[in-house]
Amino acid sequence: MKLVKERGVSITQAARDLDIHPTMLRTWIREVAADPQQAFPGKGVMKPEQAEIERLKKEVAKLKMERDILKKAAAYFAKDSL
């Protein structure tokens, strides 16, 4: 990106030099411009929004499991009381 921003090299030429598709380089430049701190978290670190989604998915799975256990317990005790 420094090639394009600081040295004035065209995106097409920079992509050729880096042996990547120009669209990929444009996407990277756009992501960095939109959110420089979170554009490429790397090393398995998720963006905060993605981490929150994962946490919520785990919580939903846990709540469903607890609900199913309670349903079975209620059915068991209802059967005994008849």
Image (cartoon, grey):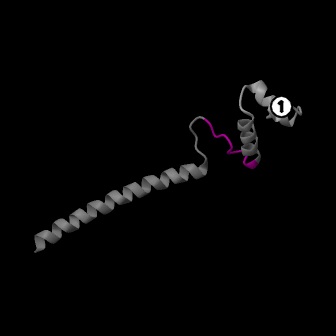
Q: Is residue 70 left or right of residue 49?
A: left
Q: Which residue is mark 1?
A: 3
Q: What's the residue at 75%, 35% (across, down)?
A: 22
The type of residue carrying mark 1 is Leu
Q: Is residue 55 left or right of residue 6?
A: left
Quadrant containing the C terminus is bottom left
> From the viewer's perspective, is residue 78 above or below residue 52?
below
Is 7 or 60 nearer to us in this picture?
A: 7
Is 9 or 53 nearer to us in this picture?
A: 9
Magenta segment, prevailing SS (helix, strand or loop): loop
Magenta range is 34-42
Q: Crowding at label 1, few (<14), some or many (≥20) Cα neighbours within 10 Å? A: some
**Residue 37: where, in percent of width, then height?**
71, 45
> Residue lying furthest bottom in this view?
82
Q: What's the residue at 11%, 69% (across, down)?
A: 80
**Residue 74: where, in percent of width, then height?**
22, 68
Residue 62: within the magenta?
Answer: no
> From the viewer's perspective, is residue 64 above or below residue 43?
below
> From the viewer's perspective, is residue 9 above or below residue 51?
above
